[in-house]
Image: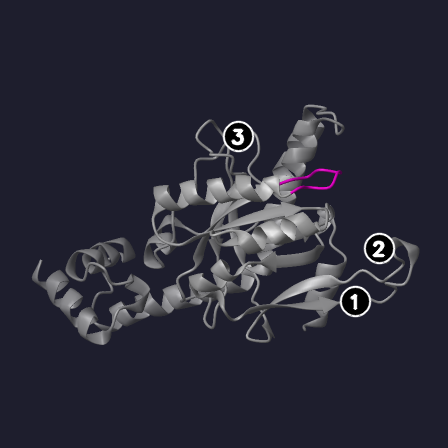
Amino acid sequence: MNPTRALLSLCPSLSSITKPPILTPFTRRLFQLPPPPPQPSPSHSDLPSFLTYATRTNLPESTTHYQGTLYEYSIQSHLRSCAFALHRVGGRSDLGIDLTGTWHVGSNPALDAPVRVVVQCKALKTKIGPNVVRELEGVTAASKRRGGGGCAGVLVSPREATKGVREALGRSGMPLVWMMVERGGRVRQVLWNGRVEGLGLAGLGVEVLYPLGSGSDGDQDGDGHGKGVVSLTWEGREVQTMDEVEEEMGRLEEEWMAKWEEKGLRDVSREEVLDAVERVVPGTRPIMISEDEREMVVRSLLAA
């Protein structure tokens, strides 16, 4: 594991969080990613802007609204280290969903079609029972019907999964994931059922890391054992972060456009090229277009 990334994952802080990169509408079309949901609040859109808003409006930190929103934005930000690209959801049509987006894991996460996810955040201090799993099942099923295709439900809590929760996950007929994520962002536990592997995620695994000093009181659980921090793996290797996935998408996008320029389309905008690809070879992922399909698109554009 990269030492710098290990240090950041083990010692997260709000001051180190920057605004996550935003995929452009063009990039989303090119890689066939779902559009983000409408922004639920005009006053804040991520963790830094929410903290600024809360300070400006003197929002009491003890309120449920403050704690819940803070945890949701924290999860949105910190789960980028686990290859999640998430957006906060709000309003009457949210179906009980807190975050929605895509999970970019696989052998080639920048090119492989990601898994759609819906996320519920339960920032509760008390133990969570199996009823939350049944609630997540309903939310995931409704999202699958509405969006089509595969969809995984993710439940995130600062508490460890109880025996009842683990058993409910195993019995569920929906692909469900449980993640224990501390309020500071450290991932302590990740569990999922067999239906998740049916979405093409059979290569997913976990590695438990123990930071230096884990024997101190601040890093021990109730039994006095050192707390481990979970790192997700794919076929035994650490998964790429969302920052890394987006960086690779940007490189592939520039490479994609360069190939069209080599075909004599320097004066054609990337939007016009993408429009032509979707028109001439419908059903093909534009970023995965073959050379024969590329020639068909070029002929179409030059004949226009």
Hey, what amino acid is under mark 1? Tyr
Q: Which residues are magenta?
A: 121-129
Which type of secondary structure does the marked residue at label 1 adopt? loop
- 73, 131: nearer the viewer: 131
Check if residue 122 falls in the magenta segment. yes
Disc 1: CA contacts within 10 A as few (<14), some (14-19) or many (>=20): some
The C terminus lies in quadrant:
bottom left
**What SS does tag 2 mark?**
loop
| Mark 1, residue position | 210
Say which of 183 and 49 sits in front: 183
- Decide which of tag 3 and tag 2 comes sooner along the chain: 3
Closest to the observer: 166 or 16? 166
CA separation, marks 3 and 2? 37 Å
Query: Compared to 11, does 260 lie above or below?
Result: below
Query: Which residue shows up at 32% across the image and 69% down it?
Result: 258
Q: Which residue is mark 2?
A: 221
Residue 251 appears in the picture as rendered? yes
Q: Which kind of residue does numbered mark 3 sit on?
A: Ser
